[in-house]
Image (spheres, rainbow, N blue to C red):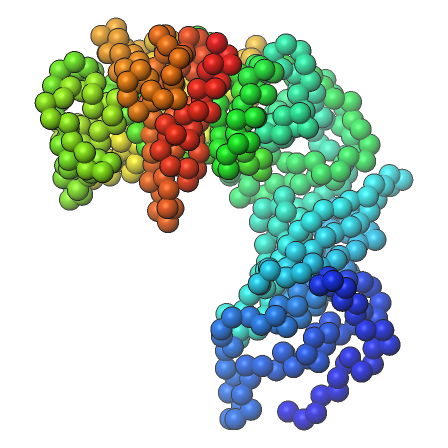
Amino acid sequence: MGKRRRVAERRKTPPAVLGGMIAVVVGGAGIGAYALYGGGAAADEGTSAQGGHKTVRTGPLTTAEVRTASTHFLTAWQKGSVTDAAAATDDPSAAGPLLTGLTKDAHLKDLTLTAGRARGAEVPFSVKATVSYHRLSKPLAYDSALTVVRRKSDGRPMVQWHSSVVHPDLKDGDKLVTGESGTPPVTALDRDGGKLTDTEYPSLGVVLDGLREKYGKTAGGRAGVELRVVRGKAARADKLSDKTLVELSKGTPGTVRTTLSPSLQAAAERQVAKRTRASVVALRPSTGEILAVANSGHGFNTAFQGSLAPGSTMKVITSSLLIDKGLASADKEHPCPKTVTYGGWKFHNDDDFQIKDGTFKASFARSCNTAFISQAKKLKDDDLTKQAQQVFGLSMNNWAIGVPTFDGAVPVQSQAQMAASLIGQGGVRMNPLNMASVAATVKSGSFHQPYLVSPSVDHRKLAAASRKLSAKTLSQLRELMQYTAAYGTAAEAMSGLGPDYGAKTGSAEVDGQKKPNGWFTAYRGDLAAAGVVQAGGHGGDTAGPIVATLLKSGG
């Protein structure tokens, strides 16, 4: 291949490496970035001179490969060499347009990128720039990270491309845009007229974004100029709203009043902050008004938009179905063996416990899986789906609460999957909003679609259920939940909150997760709440205290 002249020999000023930090700057240090480490040798590794055959380099990335690939990308990006920066990634066709848009659409200038110490193949870096639009400008600063991987075709180290490399709030397909916002800002108020901010209530950031998108144009405000994340198709499909990053000039906000209770919202924020990946919702059963919503992770509203198996909390709906059909009765004897086989699957109870000669109430309170699976052979494939839709208003994708939601999913299934759905596994998916509504329906006696903004504001139509539970079924269902709150798996969390109360715990197994997701749904008086702690363990120990604290605070 001949001798290659070392580009580094032409450098007058070597790159500065201070305390493990790589300063990527425009000028001499930005020239020949591949030569910064190893004199360009990394580019030739993996190529065989014998017979001209090219081999694919495999194995873990070396420290030098990570630094060389990341520095090349960051240097080219900072210099504005979009083609070179995109070519340093494993997806140039996606990287190029987004990087180009930083100048053209986002109006960023004076870009400075500073790389930190690599953590394996991941390289954190800081971004500083100026957002400049007409005569307006403001500084922009944030942290991001990139990951170096081997390109599949030849094993060459490249930056793994995702839009989040450019900004952590970007999902693939999103872009950054500076200009007059299409949607005026809104000032969101709690039910008492106090201002809601994500500074005081960190969980509300994504909720406030949703309120602006829904009501900004109708609430009487005027748009300002801002740098914002404009969502692409994938993020829109996930019901994510546009997000403001920098406000260059303030618009005139309109006003939107919500149903949130300031005291309950504050309590919910405190509770989820004690756990990782925790979410909770509280609402008023008699009306459907949402009083609190909180997530310990603030980037996605799991409480409203999560899609998770609800585990044994689903047994509230299943029990109503079995009682309706005469397949169970609270005080009648009901089988709870160690195991039951249906559709080729063998279903177990926790620790393979059994209840001999026990009642259905005892099975519900202790969360006996086999008590429910044993009845699968007597049910039609669509029975559970119809019960969820017709009585509890779920799984029809028609809730209109004022911001985006996932309204639960109870698909029609057969054989073992149908049986698994009876205990909240299989294809069943819910979130805390859905399960708080289930508890509220039991308490009030009929489904009231939850809402965050009164329908009188925009005259939207709320979802409705086509039928109510019979008085007999409703009475027994309340008895089951009250007994569970007093003597069953929910008793410890609900201690001291009776007698007008009811609860159900749940644990949902997740593939690849050591601990199950812990669920808890309950009501007390005219207040219902539900929560989930992902990978937390049993619901009574994890989500239970969160929910019980809100019920006590609202009582």
Where does residue 314 sit, x and y in percent of width and height?
Answer: 31, 27
Which of the pair 193/481 is nearer the observer? 481
Q: Position of residue 368 (x, y in %)?
A: 22, 29
Quadrant occupied by the N terminus? bottom right
- Judge from the rendering whether residue 410 lies leftward or rightward of residue 524; answer left or right: left
Left or right of residue 244, residue 365 in this image? left
Q: Quadrant of residue 331?
A: top left
From this viewpoint, is residue 147 visible? yes
Residue 317 makes an appearance in the image: no
Where residue 5 sits in the image (x, y, percent)? 75, 87
Question: Residue at image x 60%, y 60%?
Answer: 119
The one nearer the camera, 180 or 507, is 507
Residue with the most extreme left position: 357
- Would you identify the image quadrant in which residue 496 lies? top left
Residue 425 lies, with reference to residue 105, above or below; the image says: above
Residue displayed at 51% across by 70% down: 60
Horizontal placement of 426 versus 49: left or right?
left
Please state which of residues 78 and 87 is positioned toward the viewer in this rendering: 78
With 463 as the anchor, is 372 left or right in this view? Answer: left
Q: Nearer the viewer, residue 492 or 330?
A: 492
- Name which quarter of the figure residue 62 lies in: bottom right
Q: Give the residue at x 47% y 25%.
A: 546
How many numbered discs sit on the rendered protein? 0
Q: Position of residue 265 (x, y in %)?
A: 57, 20
Question: Furthest residue to the right?
Answer: 135
